[in-house]
Image: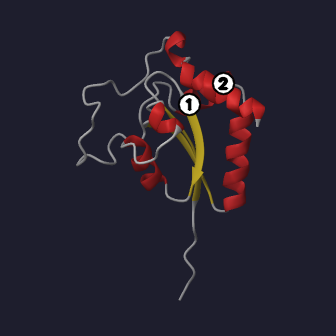
Amino acid sequence: MPHERKTYYAYIMASLWGTLYIGMTSKLHARAFEHKFHRLQGFTDKCDVERLLYWELFDEVHKAIAREKQLKGWRRSKKIALIESVNPHWLDLAREWFPWMTRSGEGRGASTPQNDSLRESSCSAQHDRKLKTV
């Protein structure tokens, strides 16, 4: 029986207000579901981080972990530039993955307004401060 090759992802999610979250997983669909429908308590739940904006695929877990750490070490402006290089309108890349689910935020827009002041938020600043102290 052939061994099934596992895949891993480094990803960036955001709230409508621009709070960014970077993570790593082997099950992107399941992790996006957990964030979107608030199945995980903590930072992403508190700051309404529900939209998948960017992801990269890796064939080895250590590569995905290294990329996650690298992205977390970047300045906010560099993270935004990376997102906008492939997703300039900040569309939720997982917006059609769970059409059968009812969203509590129904009617909210699919993308973050292009106003930079909306991309800064207290949750984001709090998260950035935590990264600097670690």
In the rendering, at what x and y percent does residue 54 appear?
A: 53, 39
Q: Which residue is mark 2?
A: 76
Disc 2 element: helix
Residue 18 visible, this orientation: yes
Disc 1 element: strand
For the point 55% across and 84% down, the residue is 2
Name of the residue lying farthest toward the bottom: 1
In the rendering, at what x and y percent does residue 120 appear?
A: 56, 17
Residues under numbered marks 2 and 1 in contact, where contact means CB atoms less than 8 Å apart: yes
The three-letter code of the residue at mark 2 reads Arg
Determine whether 53 is above or below 109 in the image: below
Image-quadrant location for residue 96 = top left
The three-letter code of the residue at mark 1 reads Leu
For the point 27% across and 34% down, the residue is 104
Image-quadrant location for residue 38 = top left
Q: Is residue 3 left or right of residue 72?
A: left
Q: Is residue 63 left or right of residue 111?
A: right
Name of the residue lying farthest toward the right: 133
Q: CA distance from mark 2 to mark 1?
A: 9 Å
Residue 49 visible, this orientation: no
Q: Nearer the viewer, residue 134 or 66?
A: 134
Crowdedness near tag 1: few (<14), some (14–19) or many (≥20) residues, C-alpha within 10 Å = many
For the point 44% across and 43% down, the residue is 35
Q: Nearer the viewer, residue 126 or 30?
A: 126
For the point 43% across and 53% down, the residue is 29
Q: Which residue is mark 1?
A: 20
Crowdedness near tag 2: few (<14), some (14–19) or many (≥20) residues, C-alpha within 10 Å = some
In the rendering, at what x and y percent does residue 128 appear?
A: 67, 27
Q: Nearer the viewer, residue 105 or 82?
A: 105
What number of labels is visible?
A: 2
